[in-house]
Amino acid sequence: MRTDMNEKKCEQIMDKFLMLDKHEHIPIDVTVHLLTCQKCRTQVRYLTLAEKYTAEPLKISGPITDSRINAILSAINPKWTTDNFKLKPVSMVRWIVCGILMILFMLSFTIFAEKVSSEFFSTVFYIIFGLFVTAYCSLFIGANLDFFIKKIERA
């Protein structure tokens, strides 16, 4: 009975480990289990070595240019052309414009709020504005998460 529970736990941990992306942070429960379970630790080492050896022939030496990428993709799929694949440019203009508009709106409110001088009204406005700024920052980070992850990995 005890070994069945251990096997089930090991299977759950290995499933959790295999669901992780490459270089993703390993959750604490998986780390603790790998430290205490020699069988799972050995499996992870073998998986890491297998990934390393299978990725070795795929490594490309030299600079990666557009023409080189096109040649590789054409070798994989002869029907592939750049006409079939259009890159959508990443633009920060909308984010910057929205951020500037929010700041201008807050500044204009503070100028006009001096005339109203209602403490309750000002407090409610600043709380709502704080929620908008929080939502804006959350959406910005969420929409550009891939960019931030790549920046963090390079640092």
Image (cartoon, rainbow, N blue to C red):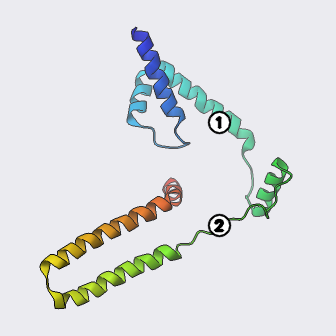
The outermost residue toward the top is: 1
What amino acid is found at the position of numbered circle 1 in the picture? Lys
The residue singled out by tag 1 in the image is 52
What amino acid is found at the position of numbered circle 2 in the picture? Lys
Residues packed near mark 2 inside 10 Å, few (<14), some (14 to 19) or many (20 plus): few
For the residue labelled by badge 2, is the local secondary structure a helix, a strand or a loop? loop
**Residues at badges 2 and 1 in contact (C-beta under 8 Å)?**
no
The N terminus sits in image quarter: top left
Q: Quadrant of residue 36?
A: top left
Q: Quadrant of residue 71?
A: bottom right
Residues packed near mark 1 inside 10 Å, few (<14), some (14 to 19) or many (20 plus): few
In the picture, the disc for residue 150 is none
| In the image, residue 147 above or below residue 128 | above
Residue at x 47%, y 16% (from the top left corner) = 7
Total numbered badges shown on the rendered structure: 2
In the picture, the disc for residue 88 is 2
Q: Quadrant of residue 44?
A: top right
Q: What x and y, as percent, mark residue 28?
A: 38, 35
Q: What x and y, as percent, mark residue 56?
A: 71, 39
Residue at x 47%, y 26% (from the top left corner) = 12
Which label sits in the foreground, 2 or 1? 2
For the residue labelled by badge 1, is the local secondary structure a helix, a strand or a loop? helix
Q: What x and y, as percent, mark residue 145?
A: 49, 58
Of residues 148 and 134, which is closer to you in this image? Answer: 134
Estimate the spatial distance between the alpha carbons at disc 2 and disc 1, rounded to whole Å: 32 Å
User: Going by the image, does 27 lie left or right of 49?
Assistant: left
Residue at x 63%, y 69% (from the top left corner) = 89
> Mark 2 or mark 1, which has the lower sequence index?
1
Residue at x 86%, y 51% (from the top left corner) = 78
The outermost residue toward the bottom is: 115
User: Going by the image, does 144 lie left or right of 1?
Assistant: right
Of residues 126 and 3, which is closer to you in this image? Answer: 126
